[in-house]
Image (cartoon, grey):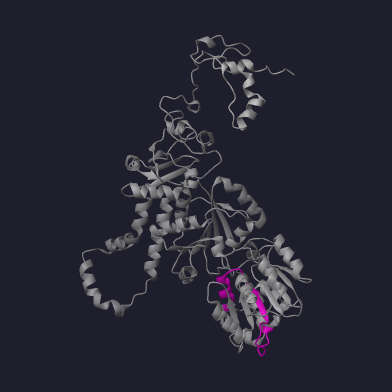
């Protein structure tokens, strides 16, 4: 293994990084640093986050700066404000013993005037997000004509975020005889195109295999029903008391809902998504970086550029649409030689996506079994014991209180005291999981036939729950959050929800069987967006009860409920014919005269009714003569 000195790193920089704990270069640094210290050496480096890439490009950039010339000499483009600030901070640390070197982070969400003033005073390295830098260029407040080194960090992320045009405009203003370094976790077609257009004879350096995940990360998947996903998440978190991780969700709404539910149930969690202001984002990230939060619930977009050390877990609350996003997610744990776990909570529809990810990252998912209630309580109990062992006792501070404390506790034996101390924290888990069974693993054979008959919903409620029908569905904008809101506003006490099956025009949901009648009574007077809500207990048998008998939940075509007594073909029966049974095929109906319905001839039917002349009259605003005299005057249609 080479040393930083052997790589050509200067003494001033080595002194700074040694104080930071850098003993030997990491693989990506060993490959990139010597090459970038040369002239006109373009590089495409494929490496996961957490592999030491900031130092790989940062150290040679700093070393090549001429401090006597206070003009922009190096430009680093990155996708997000958080990553921009992090890179600028690292460069400040690396250049601690280089007097006069100025690094300026340029990003949106902060005062552009202060950034303009800093640029006028002179800087050597600009670390920027593409949007804000382009804004400064259009204002003629920054010139890139003196830049000799350009770094595109997390280039694939910038392209995914729609910065392609901005990057093209920025690179067009940088001298062509520059050094260009493109860092990416994955080699996509867009990355290959930018490399071809803007890099000259670029050397490709790959740490690991292309698009491959970090080898220090264990990939675990849990296959559950959609209704059990949040409960599965809770069990994973509860079984890892010292978890410090990010939970990735697909949408802002889901992110907020999951975070709120976790916080309501006492977890140290918060959300990060695009609807938060910059000040709110900064506050959340500050808490998370300082370990004042255990769990950060985030969308992919909001979490881009987050670089936090020591993450133990990355939890996918469902898989992302593209494999590259999964690679970025899982790459946030297992960094700097440490191990981490990437968890995926999946339903059956995501099985194919999981196989595709396995193929791309060249790693198999371990199919995990969710911990039982007993296992969780055991883990939490030992956590309490470990924390008691590690408590630091400040004798001087607590001495004034000990006499009274001894007096209050003297009636307790040593065993009783230990039991009470442990139970103080342990009881909440024991009470929550008391009587709760294991979460069922989703398989392809789970009530498949019954699901098809009921539009995707199982007819049987799980043990201890009652299944209810409600006349609201996805077409009404009715989703789990709306159902919870409806229950909160119209029922008393806490209603425990089970499985929720949303259909197009109606839905089914399960509640604790003890609360079923309370829910039905409470929602009788409820309205949803001006429409009366109807709730009833769903039948377990096909054809019994309007809620399960029809795919549309008993609605007629006008959206209302079917009239009582009306025959229902979908309920398993066929309406009785007035004219008797259907005759054998090929025969004629003999009982037409018995029908009370008049014949077509008796109703004045004529083939001539559809004559072209009649329609022409109609569209001219005239009324065709359909009287008996009118029909008599008509000429019969010629037969062709």
**Is residue 147 something that shows in the picture?**
yes
Q: 139 above or below 208? A: below
Q: Quadrant of residue 96?
A: bottom right
Q: 9 above or below 522? A: below
The residue under the point 72% across, 18% down is 638
Question: Residue 201 in the image: x percent, y percent?
Answer: 79, 71
Q: Quadrant of the C terminus?
A: top right
Question: Residue 454 in the image: x percent, y percent?
Answer: 50, 35
Q: Is 72 contained in the magenta span?
A: yes
Magenta stretch, residue numbers = 63-88
* Left or right relative to 558: residue 433: left
Q: Is 352 contained in the magenta span?
A: no
Q: Nearer the viewer, residue 193 or 220?
A: 193
* Left or right relative to 216: residue 296: left
Question: Residue 384 in the image: x percent, y percent?
Answer: 38, 63
Question: Residue 142 in the image: x percent, y percent?
Answer: 64, 80
Q: Nearer the viewer, residue 317 or 551?
A: 551
């Amino acid at each position: 293994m080479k040393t930083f000195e052997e790589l050509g790193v200067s003494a001033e920089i080595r002194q700074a990084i040694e104080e930071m704990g850098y003993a030997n270069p990491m693989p990506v640094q060993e490959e990139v640093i010597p090459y970038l210290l040369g002239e006109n050496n373009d590089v495409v480096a494929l490496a996961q986050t957490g592999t030491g890439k900031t130092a790989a490009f940062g150290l040679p950039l700093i070393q090549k700066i001429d401090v006597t010339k206070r003009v922009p000499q190096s430009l680093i483009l990155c996708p997000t404000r958080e990553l921009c600030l992090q890179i600028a901070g690292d460069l400040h640390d690396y250049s601690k013993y280089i007097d006069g070197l100025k690094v300026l982070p340029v990003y949106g969400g902060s005062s552009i005037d202060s950034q303009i003033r800093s640029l006028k005073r002179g800087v050597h390295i600009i670390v920027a997000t593409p949007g804000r830098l382009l804004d400064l260029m259009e204002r003629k407040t920054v010139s890139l004509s003196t830049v000799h080194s350009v770094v595109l960090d997390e280039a694939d992320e910038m392209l995914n975020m729609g910065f392609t045009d901005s990057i093209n405009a920025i690179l067009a203003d940088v001298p062509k005889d520059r050094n260009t370094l493109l860092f990416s976790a994955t080699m996509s077609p867009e990355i290959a195109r930018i490399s071809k257009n803007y890099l000259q004879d670029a050397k490709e350096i790959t740490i690991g295999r292309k698009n491959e995940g970090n080898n220090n990360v264990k990939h675990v998947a849990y296959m559950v029903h959609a209704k059990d996903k949040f409960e599965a998440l809770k069990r994973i978190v509860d079984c890892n008391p010292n978890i410090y991780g990010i939970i990735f969700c697909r949408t802002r709404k889901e992110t907020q809902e999951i975070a709120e539910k976790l916080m309501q149930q006492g977890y140290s969690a918060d959300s990060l998504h695009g609807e938060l202001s910059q000040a709110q984002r900064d506050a959340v990230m500050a808490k998370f970086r300082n370990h004042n939060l255990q769990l950060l619930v985030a969308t992919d977009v909001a979490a881009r550029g987050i670089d936090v050390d020591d993450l133990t877990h990355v939890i996918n609350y469902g898989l992302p649409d593209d494999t590259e996003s999964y690679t970025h997610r899982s790459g946030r744990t297992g960094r700097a030689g440490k191990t981490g776990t990437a968890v995926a909570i999946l339903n059956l529809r995501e099985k194919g996506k999981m196989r595709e990810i396995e193929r791309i990252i060249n790693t198999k998912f371990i199919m995990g079994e969710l911990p039982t209630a007993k296992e969780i309580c055991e883990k939490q109990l030992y956590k309490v014991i470990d924390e008691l062992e590690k408590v630091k006792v400040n004798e001087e501070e607590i001495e004034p209180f000990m006499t009274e404390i001894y007096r209050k506790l003297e009636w307790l034996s040593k065993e009783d005291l230990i039991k009470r101390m442990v139970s103080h924290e342990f009881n909440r888990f024991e009470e929550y999981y008391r009587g709760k069974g294991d979460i069922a693993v989703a398989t392809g054979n789970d009530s498949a036939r019954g699901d098809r008959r009921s539009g995707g919903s199982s007819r049987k409620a799980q043990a201890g729950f009652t299944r209810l029908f409600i006349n609201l569905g996805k077409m009404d904008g009715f989703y789990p959050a709306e159902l919870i809101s409806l229950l909160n506003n119209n029922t008393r006490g806490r209603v425990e929800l089970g499985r929720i099956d949303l259909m197009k025009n109606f839905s089914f949901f399960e509640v604790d069987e003890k609360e079923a009648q309370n829910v039905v009574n409470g929602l009788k007077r409820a309205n949803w967006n001006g429409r009366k809500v109807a709730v009833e207990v769903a039948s377990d048998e096909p054809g019994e009860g309007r809620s399960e008998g029809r795919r549309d939940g008993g609605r007629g075509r006008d959206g209302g409920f079917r009239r009582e007594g009306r025959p229902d073909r979908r309920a398993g029966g066929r309406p009785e014919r007035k004219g008797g049974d259907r005759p054998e095929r090929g025969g004629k109906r003999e009982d037409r005269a018995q029908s009370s319905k008049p014949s077509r001839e008796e109703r004045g039917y004529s083939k001539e009714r559809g004559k072209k002349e009649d329609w022409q009259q109609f569209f001219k605003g005239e009324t065709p003569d359909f009287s008996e005299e009118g029909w008599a005057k008509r000429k019969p249609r010629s037969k062709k």
